[in-house]
Image (cartoon, grey):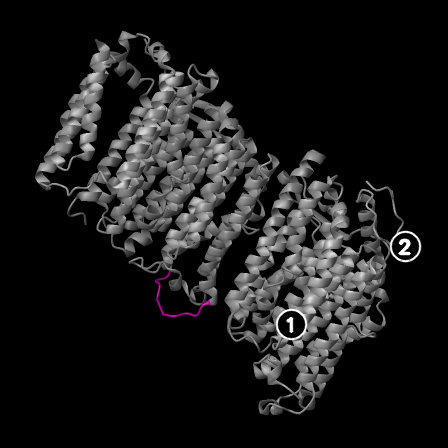
Amino acid sequence: MIGILSLHIILPMLGILALIFIPDKEKSLMKVVAIGFTLATFVVSVVMLAKFEIGPSDMQFVEYAEWIPQWGISYKIGVDGISLFLILITTLLTPLSLLSSWNSINEGHKGFLVSMLALEVGIIGVFLSMDLFLFYVFWEVMLIPMYFIIGIWGGEKRIYAAVKFIIYTMFGSLLMLVAIFWLYYLSSEQFGSPTTDLLMLYKLELPYNTQFWLFLAFTLSFAIKIPLFPFHTWLPDAHVEAPTAGSVILAGVLLKMGGYGLLRYCLPLFPEATVRLAPYLISLAVFGGIIYGALVAMVQPDMKKLIAYSSVSHMGFVVLGIFVLNQQGLQGAVIQMVNHGLSTGALFLLVGFIYERRHSRLISEYGGIAKIMPFYAATFLIVVLSSLGLPGLNGFVGEFLILVGSFKYSIFFTTFAATGVILAAVYLLWMYQRVMFGKVTNEKNSGLSDLSLREKWVIVPLIVLIVFIGIYPKPILDRIEPSVTNLLNVVQANSNGEKLKISPDVTPVSPERN
Amino acid sequence: MTESLFFIFATMAIVSALTVVVTRNPIYSAVSLVITLFSLAGIFLLLEAYFLAVVQIIIYAGAIMVLFLFVIMLLNPGKEAKFLSLTDPRTLIVTLLSIAFIGMIFSLVSGSVNYIGEVMGSVEELGTTRNIGLTLFTKYLLPFEIASLLLLVALVGAVLMTKRNLR
Amino acid sequence: MIDFQIVPADFYLLLPEMVLSVGAMLLLFLELFLKGNKTVQQWTAFAIFVVALSLLLSQESSGATGFGMMVRSDLFGQFISAVVLIGGGLTVLLGKEYLVSREWHRGEYYSLLLFASVGMLFMVRGLDLLVIFLGLELLSISLYILVGYFRDRLFSNEAALKYLLLGAFASGFLLYGIAYTYGSYGTTNLNEIRTMGSPESMTFHWIGLSLILVGFSFKVALVPFHMWLPDVYQGAPTPVTGFMATTTKAAAFAAMLRILFYGFPADIAEWMPLFWFLSAVTMTVGNVIALQQSNLKRMLAYSAIAHAGYLMIGVTVGTETGAAGMLFYLLGYLFMNIGAFAVVQYFEGKDETRLDFESYAGLAKKHPLISLAMTLFMFALAGFPLTVGFTGKFYIFTTAINQGFVWLIVIAVLNSLISVYYYLRVVIYMYMKPLEEEIEFSPMELPAKVALTVCVYAVLHLGVLPGNFITLAREAVSAIF
């Protein structure tokens, strides 16, 4: 019996296999097959969600198989509160983005669909891995389909964007590889035989000096992915040049891999370094990420670039939430990742709709669209409001929790972070106003059709979730909480007496300073 | 006596070897090579490697170099344009490096000069035809056979590269 | 009298080499009598490689020596010899189509490949410095001829001449070194040297070993002895380039390993700083210059230099696992590289003008499978996971970190990043640029297809399930330590 988690990986691969055998001219059949397999994967993950136990904090549905025993490497996967919903947004956004691309890919359909499926496999693999080698394999493998998606089916400067994307990311991941080698060596020193099993590696005793360098290497790689200022410069190019489906997955899911990496690897493996270096990361997150990202977003004439920089800003919140190292902050960070995936994914889908009609992303080309495409304007409004964190919609939940957590840590940073919310309102609403309200300034826009049935099918599920999570986030938070608490305990217990600025929820251990 | 002979032969060898490389006329070059080979044969004699000395003269100087000279005379190439200019920086660098290399080896080796005598240890029988034959066909049989393969390949190569109508 | 026996067991030991030699001579005859029938020649040559390989693998690798301790049958020799023979077989498969399309197909091509392989087998399985030297010479001369195979092409001639002159020079150094070693130990046999331990004269020992290493560094193209490589690789017929880049490297490294680790084990620690420097410089020079190449063959040549640098890390580390990593990497490198050269061979056109990146524009549309294979090889050479490029590097790099060579690995890893850039350029042109001209390539013949498929399969298999081969490499190495 194949475990439910391996099914996540196998189903898209079966989809690729099926696609290979379909003749090139059967374009519709290909699209249907691809969407079918990705929907099936989504169904599987919903089943996984239903069976997920609330309460235990360790990994569930763990599957294990020997892979390279000579090196202590195994195929081990599992899911917990932190990765559960990230997998769900992956399996949800993939079929939706494929559906949205029904008409927008002009040639090489098979390659595109195969690449998207391969991308899904890579991303899910990263979220599921419990073995460091396996994680790295998926992390790197995921780069290749993304590279092709940007480079072949992208916009004008697609080759430049694709190369920048892959080289930039690989720079980080190669340095992380050196750190992985080092961990591997340490594992053989401390355990007798080398291993890459994550749970074993958590038990490593690492002196601060070692932690410092390893933390830096891992964090650099994740910071590039998130993206955290100043390693964000690949993102605008990649987003703008990628085709819609690519941008959706890139913003919706890929960026979360960085945040996930911090939570799964940096915090538990290098707790003391985490605690000691947290202030620097928080500063970067707040000033470089939240504020800088928002400010730059404000002056963008291109909608996609605007949303790209808004992602920098929103993910800055995530990093902030992680490094304040308390219950609210971490929970907020996790749910913010989920929510950002939904709302930014939706934003890119919406921009994609209008791009398909008019082939322009410039705000100046539009105006008064609300009169012409009311349904579109309505959904756009909901998503924009979610992105800026209006209470009642999902974006608010994450940002609120993070700000609460950050408030417990430092009022100084919180004040600045909160201005990020205000700035988000500014650039998002201003964009919305320029595009949707007012007179119809451009003649070409007057004949545009509102959303088709297919497009409605794409956007409505996301709207539903946005609203639902905004009103009733409890089921999600309930499932996230145990793993987060566990993580906090691990960090607190192993950070060698460094005091965390924690709330009374988490009991401190050994309060002496070193 | 042996020492002075060694120095005479050695000097001859070095000078003629340099001439091979430096001279512009290819026939001078080939003849200098013959002289080098003769000098080396002389050194072999001093080392009591009689067989080797004779074989060197007969085969190398006698057969191979004669063949070289035949081909050169048949092709009748003219004099080379001056190609080893003394003012060319490359010549200077190469000369300096070579002197450095030789000097290095010399200084390293001269420290162990006593040892050379020991290894030489006198086995008068060492260089005789009989001994060479015995060793060559028993202990060193395998290298001997590999060398023969080597000659075959060289033959194939020569034909492949130069035969006029190969189709 | 001399106490020496030649036993039938000795001949049994040398069966692979004998089969190869006899086969080579047989092909010379076939060329004479079967002038028109090229297919027969090709399949005969291939069959000979297969037979030799099976004979090799069926030998008991017990460490038995033969011919007066001149050759040794151990797992180490078997492993690399297998790599050589597989490489030879693949080159035979790829050669016929290439030569026929240029109307210069001769049986000597196969004979020379076989002779070169004989030389390599002796290099790898030889236990005496003289045997190793003669094997090296046999290999070199066969290669000089193969490189200059297209004798009416100036480019080819120049490459062959360069290789000959520089190779002869390097062989001179090697022989000089062997002479000094003999002066130091009184013997050229590695077995005896090993048991003797420290020699009478350390100076001679050092000079000898240094010169020997210089000779081998040339063959393997370590910086600064690499200058010959790009021109020679570019001028040689493409299948021969593939053969040279992989099997020669494997044999030369194997000989180096045997000499260093088996013959002079006490010295390894002393040499470490020098090897460190050699590998770091070689990697960097190879990768950086490759970036600037616009000719694909030349780019692959410089990448070969870079990979020699990665392999040197294994020598620098100086432990069993380091050497095992090298063996595993050499096996994987064989398939990655021959595969890449096979694709280059297919696309380069008769006059070999289609070697720049622009000629690869848009090829993915017309030749999806071959482009996919090329992409795989490029990613493998760059070191992406799921390919043997990654597992090989993982093996060597982790061993180095285990021994504390962190900075060397940082350099290596950054070099890998640089290499990603130029390996990906091919992929970019194939997939992301529009198809400019409509060039018709005659479809790939079956033998070449088989070779390509084997390479693809091997790269993936060794990348995803390397376990057995890792164990094999480890066992192989224990034979020489």
Where does residue A270 sit, x and y in percent of width and height?
A: 73, 46
Q: Amino acid at mark 1?
A: Ser
Quick check: can you spot residue A397?
yes
Q: Earlier in the sequence, mark 1 or mark 2?
A: 1
Residue found 21% across the figure and 51% down from its top: C152
Question: Relative to A156, is C47 on the left or the right?
Answer: left
Where does residue A340 sit, x and y in percent of width and height?
A: 73, 68
Q: Residues within 10 Å of mark 2 (few under 14, many from 20)?
A: few
Identify the image quadrant of residue B116: top left
A119 or B9, which is in the foreground? B9
Question: Which residue is tagged 2?
Answer: A505
B80 or C247, which is in the foreground? B80
Where does residue B100 sit, x and y in percent of width and height?
A: 34, 29
| Residue C169 higher or lower than B108, as above or below | below
| Residue C479 higher or lower than C161, as above or below | above
Question: Which residue is tagged 1?
Answer: A97
Identify the image quadrant of residue B142: top left
Q: Chain of mark 2?
A: A
Residue situated furthest right in the rendering: A504
Q: Residues within 10 Å of mark 1 (few under 14, many from 20)?
A: many
